[in-house]
Image (tube, grey):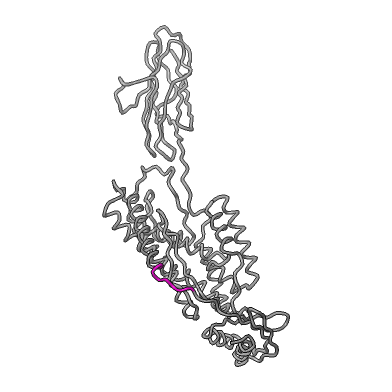
């Protein structure tokens, strides 16, 4: 078909739905100025879009300079689908997620070895299965809504990762442009909503399992990874509380990942799910919201470096969201309500610092059990008792030494749980997290000491802490 015939064919197709009063052709598109019936504009354009899609064209409706214009371009040649890629990625991601589940169960159950059948069985059941279900339903919700609008979309592509997550999530590829603002809102919100409807029951199950966990208060938290719960998870945790000192159950952690994924996807930026919703609601003004979101992420990156990565990822994928084919028709009240609900879910699922490392501290305190002053006769012994308490976040080693000893005096230290004959001038204590050691200091006063008052100093040191205590001895 020559160009003139092709232009006439396109004009005729558009004229079946709209009054065309001007036609302008270029090498890559045909633009027609139309006089629409605004009451049925959306319906007419949707009929035109489906009709032209069947013959390999894409119409674009715009309102510029007080005129309605439909531009028609050729539909790009679709790349041949390779569903085996989806399957291979799913199998690989299932493997990495199962391994991540085994790793989590190994830490949760305090198993002696990672590579056991039970770790992989329970890791699969309690982590890999719920997490892949959350992510799968999220993407399949996008897929189903895309099909409802007649958009050619791929099956989910899962992305494998290393523990503790085992996956970076999943995505679908849409091979057709968004037809209108309603599709932007509906398709964008379908994924987070579908994923959340699975995440909530998974969270309930995880919290119930958490509540049955065994507390482990003696395990040092220093250096471990701590998670911050979003508002919605915190409220659920109030209804199903967990004992103090319980490690998070892998199922509860899978739910946490589900909430976190929901929050990330609902960010109103670029081509994230929240970006789709924002573009549908705000039109071209959504660009400013997208830029503001990225700026906020960079600021939040000061306290959590992961936000830098997400901000850069959005920049890489594109800050500006493409316009739908029909960027003219207004949204109804229901879609506006969906936008408000998306914002509420973002607030409920977002956390400022999702993951953090518990600081390693080697602090301790010296607490007196007896009085730190006494009166003794020359030639006798003075005894003082105290506890050295580990107040840090790891197991610590404390060295005790006596300083400022008067001439001819001597002092030794020993743990009261041990034989006093093992007393020494320098005492090394290995104190587990949350525990203390009971210690005594024995001071020998020379027989020829004249009546006086002396002060000796006990010095305790650990990796980054020094604590001293004074003891006063009055010789009668």
> Which residue does the image show at 31% across and 22% down from the upper left?
420
> Which residue does the image show at 54% across and 83% down from the upper left?
56
Q: Nearer the viewer, residue 303 or 337?
A: 303
Quadrant of the snapshot with the N terminus: bottom right
Q: Nearer the viewer, residue 56 or 435?
A: 56
> Image quarter for residue 27?
bottom right
Q: Is residue 365 above or below residue 2?
A: above
Q: Position of residue 100 (x, y in %)?
A: 37, 55
> Image quarter for residue 442?
top left
For the view shown, which residue lies furthest in the front direction? 2
For the view shown, which residue lies furthest in the left direction? 117
Q: Nearer the viewer, residue 327 or 347?
A: 327
* In the image: residue 84, left or right of residue 41: left
Q: Is residue 139 above or below residue 61?
A: above
Q: Is residue 166 visible?
A: yes
Magenta segment boundaries in residue numbering: 79-86
Residue 230, magenta (yes or no): no
For the view shown, which residue lies furthest in the right direction? 65
Count of marks placed on residues: 0
Q: Is residue 39 visible?
A: no
Quadrant of the snapshot with the C terminus: top left
Q: Position of residue 203 (x, y in %)?
A: 40, 62
Q: Position of residue 5 (x, y in %)?
A: 62, 89
> Which residue does the image show at 65% across and 65% down from the upper left?
288
> Image quarter for residue 285?
bottom right
Residue 82, magenta (yes or no): yes
Q: Is residue 29 above or below residue 396?
A: below
Q: Nearer the viewer, residue 402 or 1?
A: 1
């Amino acid at each position: 078909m020559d160009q003139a015939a092709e232009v006439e064919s396109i004009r005729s197709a558009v004229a079946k739905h709209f009054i065309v009063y001007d036609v302008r052709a270029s090498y890559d598109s045909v633009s027609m100025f139309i006089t629409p019936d605004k009451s049925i504009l959306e319906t007419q354009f949707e009929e035109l879009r489906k009709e032209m899609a069947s013959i390999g064209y894409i119409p674009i409706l715009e309102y510029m300079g007080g005129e309605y214009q439909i531009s028609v371009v050729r539909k790009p040649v679709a790349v041949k689908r390779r569903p085996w890629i989806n399957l291979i990625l799913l199998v690989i991601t299932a493997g990495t997620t199962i391994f991540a589940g085994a790793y989590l169960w190994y830490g949760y159950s305090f198993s002696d070895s990672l590579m056991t059948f039970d770790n992989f069985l329970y890791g699969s059941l309690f982590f890999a299965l719920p997490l892949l279900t959350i992510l799968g339903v999220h993407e399949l919700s996008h897929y189903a809504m895309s099909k409802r609008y007649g958009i050619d979309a791929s099956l989910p592509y899962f992305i494998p990762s290393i523990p503790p997550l085992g996956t970076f999530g999943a995505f679908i590829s849409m091979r057709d442009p968004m037809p209108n603002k309603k599709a932007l809102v509906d398709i964008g919100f379908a994924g987070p909503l579908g994923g959340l409807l699975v995440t909530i029951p998974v969270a309930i199950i995880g919290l119930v399992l958490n509540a049955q966990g065994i507390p482990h208060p003696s395990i040092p938290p220093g250096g471990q990874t701590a998670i911050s719960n979003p508002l919605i998870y915190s409220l659920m945790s109030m209804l199903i509380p967990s004992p103090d000192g319980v490690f998070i159950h892998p199922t509860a952690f899978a739910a946490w990942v589900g909430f976190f994924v929901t929050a990330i996807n609902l960010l109103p930026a670029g081509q994230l799910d929240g970006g789709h919703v924002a573009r549908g609601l705000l039109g071209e003004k959504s660009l400013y919201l997208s830029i503001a979101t990225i700026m906020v992420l960079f600021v939040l990156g000061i306290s959590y470096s992961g936000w830098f990565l997400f901000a850069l990822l959005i920049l890489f994928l594109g800050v500006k969201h493409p316009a739908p084919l029909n960027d003219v028709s207004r949204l109804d009240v229901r879609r506006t309500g969906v936008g408000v609900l998306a914002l509420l879910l973002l607030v409920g699922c977002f956390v400022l610092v999702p993951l953090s490392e518990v600081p390693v501290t080697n602090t301790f305190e010296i607490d007196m059990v007896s009085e730190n002053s006494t009166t003794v006769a020359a030639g006798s012994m003075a005894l003082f008792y105290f506890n050295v308490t580990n107040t840090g976040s790891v197991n610590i080693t404390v060295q005790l030494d006596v300083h400022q000893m008067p001439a001819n005096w001597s002092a030794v230290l020993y743990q009261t749980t041990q034989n006093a004959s093992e007393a020494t001038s320098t005492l090394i204590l290995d104190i587990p997290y949350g525990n203390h050691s009971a210690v005594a200091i024995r001071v020998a006063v020379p027989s020829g000491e004249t009546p006086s008052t002396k002060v000796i100093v006990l010095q305790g040191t650990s990796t980054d802490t020094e604590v001293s205590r004074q003891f006063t001895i009055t010789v009668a």
